[in-house]
Image: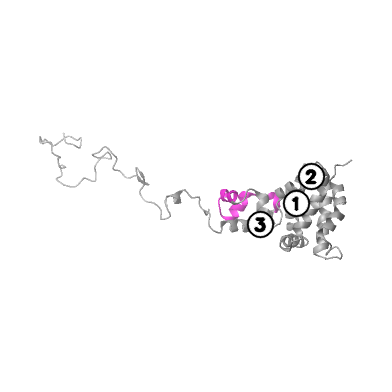
Amino acid sequence: MSITGRPSNGSSDGSVDAPANGSSERSTDAPANGPSGRSTATPANGSADGPAERSADGPAEGRRRPGRRPGSADTRGQILAAARETFAEKGFDKATIRGIARRAEVDPALVHHYFSGKEKMFVEAMELPINPENVLAAIMAGPREEVGERLVRLILTITSEAGARQPVLALARTAMTNERMVVMIREFVTRALLNRVAESLDIPLIRMEAAFAQMFGVVLMRYVLQLEPLASVDLEELVKLLTPTIQGYLDPPR
């Protein structure tokens, strides 16, 4: 028997026998299980050890979902642009992370990588100066009887900086002539901010809305219409003037 494990052609010296057709090359008709017992047949998608060919883009190319781009230097900007369009089109409530990812042509996992949630994405997409989580933490960080002062001071301090208040005022102006913008802002302010503060203070939502409406009106009069002396009065004097009224809204109903 030869070392290939196949019967010899009568040779007794143990040498490897040539095929019967006399060719010195291996026959292309050799069995799938070659001399070493290992398959010599090449599967349609490559060798037994893996693909015979790899894409020029690397081994992950075959696993990448069509139409999805991996992260890049501008992925965050692409997501924010898609978020602005989606929020304006669908409003805050109906906009979804998956829908924003689809518009940005990225995997939803990338959206979660850059943004911890829809609220933070909205804040950044609209360039708002406040984050609902930070507002809630600031308002609740202290005695209940001083919550009105903290809210007044927070809003007046934030809007005292031109760069911070301009996006808010721009949204307000746009909302006056754009119904979709009205829906988007109303849903965000209600769901992400007013509801949460009202629940934390255990007061009816109407009370929180009244407090917010008064503060928003003060900001408009102070910086848009620039009514004097409201426009130029010292911030601390304004805090002292407004605090009792806002505190009255936020106290538990009797």
Q: Quick check: 244 left or right of 34? A: right
Kindly identify the residue that appears in the image at 77 percent across and 44 percent down. 142
Residues 129 and 27: in front is 129
Question: Label 1 to label 3, Cα distance in Å?
Answer: 15 Å
Residue farthest toward the right in the current orientation of the protein: 254
Nearer mark to the viewer, of 2 and 1? 2
Q: Is residue 160 magenta?
A: no
Q: Residues within 10 Å of mark 1 (few under 14, many from 20)?
A: some
Mark 1, residue position: 189
Does residue 5 appear left or right of residue 72 in this picture? left
Q: Position of residue 48 (x, y in %)?
A: 34, 42
Q: Residue at x 73, y 51 (%)?
A: 188
The part of the chain drawn in magenta is 91-113
Q: Earlier in the sequence, mark 1 or mark 3?
A: 3
Which image quadrant: the N terminus?
top left
Question: On the image, numbered disc 3 is attached to which residue?
Answer: 125
Q: Amino acid at mark 2?
A: Ala
From the top left corner, tell me how far across and down residue 195 is, in percent: 77, 46
Residue at the spot of label 2: 198
Which quarter of the picture shows residue 16?
A: top left
Q: Nearer the viewer, mark 3 or mark 2?
A: 2
- State the separation of the CA atoms marked 3 and 2: 25 Å
Residue 150, above or below 159: above
